[in-house]
Amino acid sequence: MASLVPLSPFAPASESWDSYLARFDCYLQANELTRGSVEQKRGLFLSLCGPEVFATARALVAPLAVQAEPWDTIQEKLRNHYTPKMAAHHAFYHRNQAEGESINNYTAALRQAAMHCEFRDLDDALMDRIVCGEIRKATRTLVLALGDPAAALMKISNPGRIQS
């Protein structure tokens, strides 16, 4: 198969690290390279990731050569660098519902923000944020009255049941 347009370098300001890795996996799939060796995947990734990510990878594995470091280790070190857990928690706990944002969109945004938080109980964390960050008093009151995070999430996901 002819090679497709090269993968654009990672841009931290406009995309998450996991999204970039997912795009890299899609690139491998589109170019029929998914069955390649881990060495080939590592080499292709390091060739396409851009100079900033390459320099970061080199620094994270120093004094070893980045080309000699296992692909899994490079991915883990870069993930830890670009999506630190504390930053993910900060983003999650400071995400409030925007004016005019539906509860479903707000909950989806919270779920996305929680992806790297590694919460033991995601439903509890979501309920904490909804209670503290939800604009509409009726939703907050409902969540507090139900007491069960899973039941509250199911109830608020049907906006017709909640009156302002």
Image (spheres, rainbow, N blue to C red):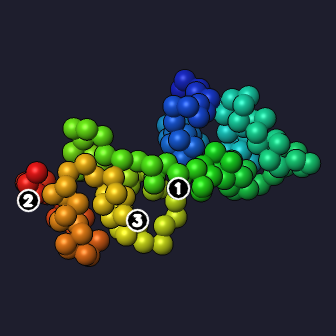
Q: Nearer the viewer, residue 141 or 2?
A: 141
Q: Amino acid at mark 3?
A: Ala
Label 2 Cα neighbours within 10 Å, binned few <14 / some 14-19 / many ≥20: few
Residue 82's place in the image compared with 118, above or below, is above
**Is 6 displayed left or right of 150 in the figure?**
right
Report how far apart the C-alphas of labels 2 and 3 lie in the structure.
22 Å
Residue designated by label 1: 89
What percent of the width, then of the height, locates residue 108?
A: 32, 50
Q: Nearer the viewer, residue 25 or 40?
A: 25
Residue designated by label 2: 161
Q: Tag 1's secondary structure?
A: helix
Report how far apart the C-alphas of labels 3 and 1 lie in the structure.
10 Å
- Res. 47 in view: no
Residue designated by label 3: 125
Q: Amino acid at mark 2?
A: Arg
**Is 106 displayed left or right of 46 in the figure?**
left
Label 1 Cα neighbours within 10 Å, binned few <14 / some 14-19 / many ≥20: some
| Residue at 72% over, 52% down | 77
Residue 116's place in the image compared with 10, above or below, is below
